[in-house]
Structure formats: C-alpha cells, structure tokens
Image: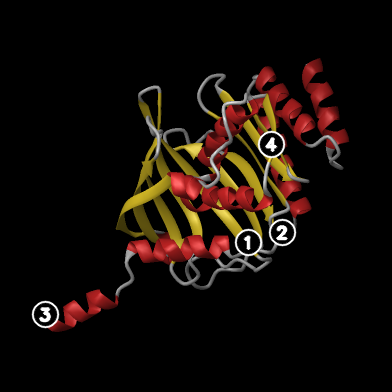
C-alpha cells in the first residue's frame, strides 16, 4: 500500500507545474478576451465590472472601476495601439511610447500572476516615472515579479482546484504578498483570484473573478453539465461593461447618492467618447445632474 501511495504521489501534478500550464495558455493565445469582476473581500456589495482585450501585439486595452467604502474610488483604463500607451488612474493620464511585444508580455502577467487591477496600477506607476524622465519602465514584469512557495490549497466549487503562491519582487515595499487562484484542471483556464494587497500598512484581500476566452474558443465552466458561455466580441464586452456601470449609476441615484452616480456616468462618457451608447450615457448624465 505504501508503494502504491508513493507512486500515486509521483504521478500527481505539482502546483507549480499546473500554474505554468495556466500561464502558458495565456501567453500562447493571440486573442484574449476577459470579462471580470473585482471587489474587496470584506465589501462584496462593492462589486465592480471590468474588461480586458488583447489582440496579438498590436492592440490591447483594459478598463475597470474599483470602489470601497464612503467616497473612495479608483477608475482605471489603459489602451495600447500604434506603438502608444495611454493610461489613466483616477483621472491622471499618462502617454508613453511602447513596444508591442513587451507591452503584450506585461499584459499577460496582469492576468496570469498579478491580477488585472494590481498589474494596471503597477504599470501606471512605472509609466508615470518614465514620462517624467526617470528612466524607462521595466521591460518584463515576469522577471520583476517572480513567484515562490507554490502550494495546493484544496478544491473549489464545480470541480475547480486552488493554488496558493507568494510574490517575490525586485523592489521594496512590495504591496502584494500572496495570492490564491482557482482554475479548471481540465482546461487550465483561470477562474478566480484572491490576493493580499497592503496599502499604508493595512492588508486587504482583493478578489477578481474571470470569464476568459482564448483565441475565440467557447468557455465551459469547471464541472460537468453546465452550458457553454458564448464567445463575445470586443464590442459586446464593451456593451456589457457599460451596461453594468449604468446599473451601478442607477443604484447610486436610487440610494440618494447623486454625486457617485454622476461620477460613474462622467467616467463612461470620457472612456467611451465614440461608443454607440454615448447618447444614452449623456442623457442619463443630464438627468442625474438635474435631480
């Protein structure tokens, strides 16, 4: 029995090997489409939506809006096209030149290692320093944010598996200390991430959940007997994101928080100035300001 057990353990895939397969699937995909939600673990009522789309090494973009208690708010978006990066965090806009290959590598790391929100925040800081003449931004986030202490952390819902790992960074202080990811062991598709984020000495668990399409494939959630998620184009993902934010704005108005509703609508108008839904966004914004 001991020999059989030892053989079984040898045949089991290590957590690090499983993570490498998850990361490799993202890196080798030309097209990546992500719909995701994010929220602080202790504030599930502050659930926010975001999107990220990667088209080879030529076009990339992400957008999200994170809110916590009170009036605290961080709206972020990044676009890359024609060798230019435009990135905004809470209204602070940075524009720098970028190489498509390096930019895509770093976007891969957002999804595979760091989380989309933390990855975008880190790079915005690096790009800000570069635009001020403080040197070039890091070329490879994968080299800067290495990982260690991979551990199997049990089973998740619907047949998913959980891996825990620690962050090792080339700079201090390091805001991220550890993360746990949920994935489908049949497809190695990422489903969820929880990670510990330290800000001004306070620890907070940030949660991101993902619906990912790689190279236009249909996505079947972990577990059997569930319907496939339809493939969504960039335009469809943008509509879903805008609709989710419009619902958030409506909820703020319903709760009597006029200013937060206006903030959401103004962000949408600024981030999607040519979208087909812009007239509706502007109409709702005028109504909100008139209340």
Q: Nearer the viewer, mark 3 or mark 2?
A: 3
Q: Earlier in the sequence, mark 3 or mark 2?
A: 3
Judging by the rendered image, the residue that carries numbered circle 1 is 213
Quadrant containing the N terminus is bottom left
Q: Secondary structure at mark 1?
A: strand
Mark pair 4, 3: CA separation: 56 Å
Quadrant containing the C terminus is top right
Q: Earlier in the sequence, mark 2 or mark 4?
A: 2
Crowding around mark 4 (Cα neighbors within 10 Å: few <14, some 14 to 19, many 20+) is many
| C-beta proximity under 8 Å, tags 1 and 3 | no
Q: Earlier in the sequence, mark 4 or mark 3?
A: 3
Judging by the rendered image, the residue that carries numbered circle 3 is 2
Q: Nearer the viewer, mark 2 or mark 4?
A: 2
Residue 189 visible? The answer is no
Judging by the rendered image, the residue that carries numbered circle 2 is 232
Judging by the rendered image, the residue that carries numbered circle 4 is 245
């Amino acid at each position: 029995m001991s020999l059989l057990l030892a053989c079984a353990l040898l045949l089991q895939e290590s957590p690090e090997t499983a993570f490498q397969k998850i990361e490799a699937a993202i890196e080798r995909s030309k097209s990546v489409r992500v719909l995701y939600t994010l929220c602080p673990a202790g504030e599930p009522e502050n659930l926010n939506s975001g999107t990220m789309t990667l088209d080879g090494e030529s076009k990339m973009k992400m957008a999200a809006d994170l809110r916590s208690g009170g009036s605290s708010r961080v709206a972020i978006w990044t676009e890359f096209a024609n060798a230019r990066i435009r990135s905004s965090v809470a209204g602070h806009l940075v524009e720098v030149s970028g190489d498509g290959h390096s930019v895509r590598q770093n976007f891969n790391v957002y999804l595979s290692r760091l989380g989309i929100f933390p990855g975008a925040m880190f790079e915005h800081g690096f790009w800000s320093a570069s635009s001020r003449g403080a040197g070039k931004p890091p070329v490879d986030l994968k080299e800067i944010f290495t990982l260690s202490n991979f551990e199997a952390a049990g089973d998740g819902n619907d047949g998913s598996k959980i891996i825990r790992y620690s962050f090792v960074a080339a700079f201090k202080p390091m805001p991220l200390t550890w993360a746990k990811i949920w994935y489908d062991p049949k497809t190695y598709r990422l489903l969820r991430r929880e990670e510990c984020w330290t800000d001004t000495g306070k620890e907070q668990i940030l949660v991101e959940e993902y619906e990912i399409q790689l190279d236009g494939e249909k996505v079947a959630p972990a577990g059997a007997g569930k319907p496939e998620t339809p493939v969504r184009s960039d335009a469809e993902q943008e509509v879903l994101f805008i609709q989710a934010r419009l619902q958030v704005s409506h909820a703020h108005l319903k709760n009597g928080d006029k200013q937060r509703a206006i903030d959401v609508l103004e962000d949408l108008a600024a981030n999607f100035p040519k979208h087909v839904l812009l007239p509706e966004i502007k109409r709702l914004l005028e109504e909100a300001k008139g209340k």
